[in-house]
Image (cartoon, rainbow, N blue to C red):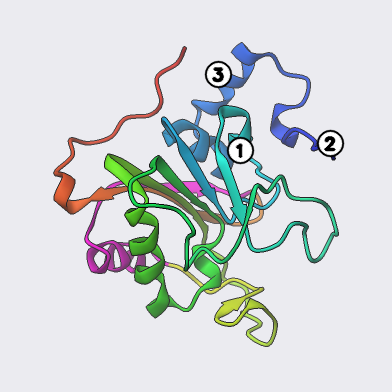
C-alpha cells in the first residue's frame, strides 16, 4: 500500500495542538475539518489536505494521482463528481474542496444538487473555493467542462448557486490561501429547515 504524507500544517504537532490550530479557521483545510461531521464524502479529494480520510471519509477523485506532480491521491472511488456512484442519503457531510472553481458557473448548481442528493436529512455541504484573479486558461481540461485553471468566483455567485440548488447558505467565510483569498461555505438543504450549523465540537 502506498504511504501518504500528513498535511504540512499537521506535521510534528500533537492532537491537542492540532485542535487549537484547526479552530482558528485560518485556511481552507481547517475550515473543511471544522465543519465536517459524521460520515463524510470528500469529493475531488486531491491529496486530502484536511486529512479527512483519518476520520473515515470516503475519498473520491477523477484521477488516482496528481496529473501535474504525479503524486498519489488517497482515493477510494474514482469518478466524475457530476455523476456520483452513491445512493441517496449516505453522508452527513459532503466536502467540495477546491473544485467548484474549475466548472463553468452555469454548471455549478447541478454539481451542488448531485452532492446534496447524497446527504442524510440534516446533512451539510462544506465547500472551499479560492478567489483567483489570475487570467483563466480554458485551453486545458481535467475532463470535458472541467478546466485545469480556476474560474473567478465571487460571493454573489455562491449565493446564486445555492439558491438555484435549493440550498440554505448557513456560513460564508473569508479564507486565507496564502497567495490569495477565498471562500468557505456551509449549506444545508432548504427542505431540511435546519438551525444554523456550528463547528465540530472539540473532543
- Distance from disc 2 to disc 1, alpha carbons, whole Å, reads 16 Å
Outermost bottom residue: 139
Q: Nearer the viewer, mark 3 or mark 2?
A: 2
- Distance from disc 3 to disc 2, alpha carbons, whole Å, reads 26 Å
Q: Earlier in the sequence, mark 2 or mark 1?
A: 2
**Residue under the point 49% across and 38% down:** 31
Q: Is residue 64 above or below residue 171?
A: below
Q: Quadrant of the N terminus?
A: top right
Label disc, if present, on residue 20 of the rendered structure: 3
Per the rendered image, the range of residues in magenta is 154-177
Label disc, if present, on residue 50 of the rendered structure: 1
Q: Earlier in the sequence, mark 1 or mark 3?
A: 3
Instruction: Answer yes or no: is residue 19 visible.
Output: yes
Label disc, if present, on residue 3 of the rendered structure: 2
Position in image of residue 96 (x %, y %): 49, 53
| Dot 2 alpha-carbon crowd within 10 angstroms: few under 14, some 14 to 19, many 20 or more | few
Position in image of residue 12 (x %, y %): 78, 20
- Report the front residue among 175 and 73: 73
- Distance from disc 1 to disc 3, alpha carbons, whole Å, reads 15 Å
Q: Earlier in the sequence, mark 3 or mark 2?
A: 2
**Residue under the point 51% across and 63% down:** 81
| Dot 3 alpha-carbon crowd within 10 angstroms: few under 14, some 14 to 19, many 20 or more | few
Amino acid at each position: 500500500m502506498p504511504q501518504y504524507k500528513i498535511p504540512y500544517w499537521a506535521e510534528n504537532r500533537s492532537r491537542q495542538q492540532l485542535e487549537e490550530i484547526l479552530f482558528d479557521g485560518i485556511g481552507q483545510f481547517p475550515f473543511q475539518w471544522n465543519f465536517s461531521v459524521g460520515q463524510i464524502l470528500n469529493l475531488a479529494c486531491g491529496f486530502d489536505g484536511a486529512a479527512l480520510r483519518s476520520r473515515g471519509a470516503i475519498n473520491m477523485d477523477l484521477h488516482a494521482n496528481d496529473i501535474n506532480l504525479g503524486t498519489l491521491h488517497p482515493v477510494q472511488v474514482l469518478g466524475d463528481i457530476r455523476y456520483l456512484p452513491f445512493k441517496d442519503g449516505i453522508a452527513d457531510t459532503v466536502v467540495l474542496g477546491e473544485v467548484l472553481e474549475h466548472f463553468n458557473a452555469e454548471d455549478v448548481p447541478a454539481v451542488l444538487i448531485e452532492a446534496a442528493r447524497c446527504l442524510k436529512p440534516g446533512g451539510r455541504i462544506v465547500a472551499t473555493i479560492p478567489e483567483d484573479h489570475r487570467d483563466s486558461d480554458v485551453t486545458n481540461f481535467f475532463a470535458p467542462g472541467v478546466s485545469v485553471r480556476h474560474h473567478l468566483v465571487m460571493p454573489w455567485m455562491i449565493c446564486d448557486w445555492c439558491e438555484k440548488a435549493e440550498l440554505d447558505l448557513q456560513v460564508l467565510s473569508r479564507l486565507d490561501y496564502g497567495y490569495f483569498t477565498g471562500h468557505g461555505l456551509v449549506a444545508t438543504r432548504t427542505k431540511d429547515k435546519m438551525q444554523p450549523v456550528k463547528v465540530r465540537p472539540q473532543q
